[in-house]
Amino acid sequence: MRWVNRQVGRGGRVLLGAVPILLLLLVYIVMAASRHAVNPADKILPLPGSMAESMSALLFVPDQLTGQLVFWADTLASLQRLGIGLGISTLMALVVGLALGVLPPVRATFGPLVTGIAVIPPIALLPILFIALGLGETSKVALIVIGIAPVMIRDIAAHVSALPREQVIKALTLGANSWQVMIRVALPQAMPRLLHAIRLALGPAWVFLISAEAIASDVGLGYRIFLVRRYLSMDVILPYVAWIALLAIAMDMALTFLSHRLFPWAHGESH
């Protein structure tokens, strides 16, 4: 059987997916051990024991100034900012994307504006946001929204505008108005695409969040990474980066499960 026709079961996918990760961990441990054999004080590639010792203080020992568990306080702050930014962006993508996709006059009027905002590097706007909105939570959330909402809007609008024209004609023939076409024809078919757009936006959203926290924040995963970098604390930086990756993977898996659960027809599945 040719590889292009070879299907992999669920258990096989888990096993095959774990192999490169385990190999990467093995390579890291070997390289770290070899560096520490030459220089026991090496900070570039910390050993697992060193990382566990450093992280245990952040995980279980309250901070002397704030009384908070630093790791969990950082995680909660970052997830709150990310959640608000994703929520606002999702709502904008759904409302504006539907309008652009269904209504040609709206698309002609606002389409170029959305495209223009989408191609601006959001990081270039960060100083403007800090000046205009201050250094608080608003500017950080705004960066996430500006960074991902226009792209999500364009994706939803393109998907909706590409729906078969026959569906719109049939709805109009049955007496539907523009609002009903948008809600009853376009919206149900846009929902699976919306979840897909959120999945694609997760990576950029994390980038914008970490960038904002690194520049102006006093708590958060990005803040902590850039705070300890001056001390070459790779035993904290690497676990934090791994934790961000795990959070992103968990979010992606949750969205994938939700999409298959709510819209099996969009994935070629039956109820």
Image: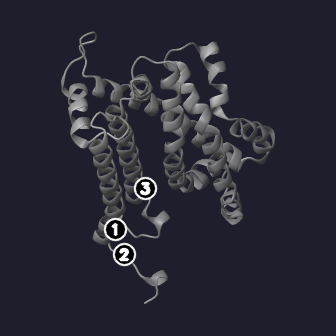
Is 13 on the left or on the right of 129, as rendered? left
Outermost left residue: 60
Type of the residue with mark 1: Leu
Q: Is 263 above or below relative to 92?
A: below
Secondary element type, mark 2: loop
Point 76% across, 36% down: residue: 113
- Quadrant, the N terminus: bottom left
- Between tags 2 and 3, which lies in front? 2
Type of the residue with mark 3: Ser
Point 53% across, 44% down: residue: 201
Residue identifier under label 1: 16
Q: Quarter of the image holding residue 132?
A: top right
Q: Quarter of the image holding residue 91?
A: top right
Residue identifier under label 2: 8
Any mark on residue 99, and which? none
Outermost top residue: 65
Is 171 on the left or on the right of 203, as rendered? right
* Alpha carbon separation for disc pair 2 and 1: 9 Å
The x and y percentages for residue 216 are 51, 18
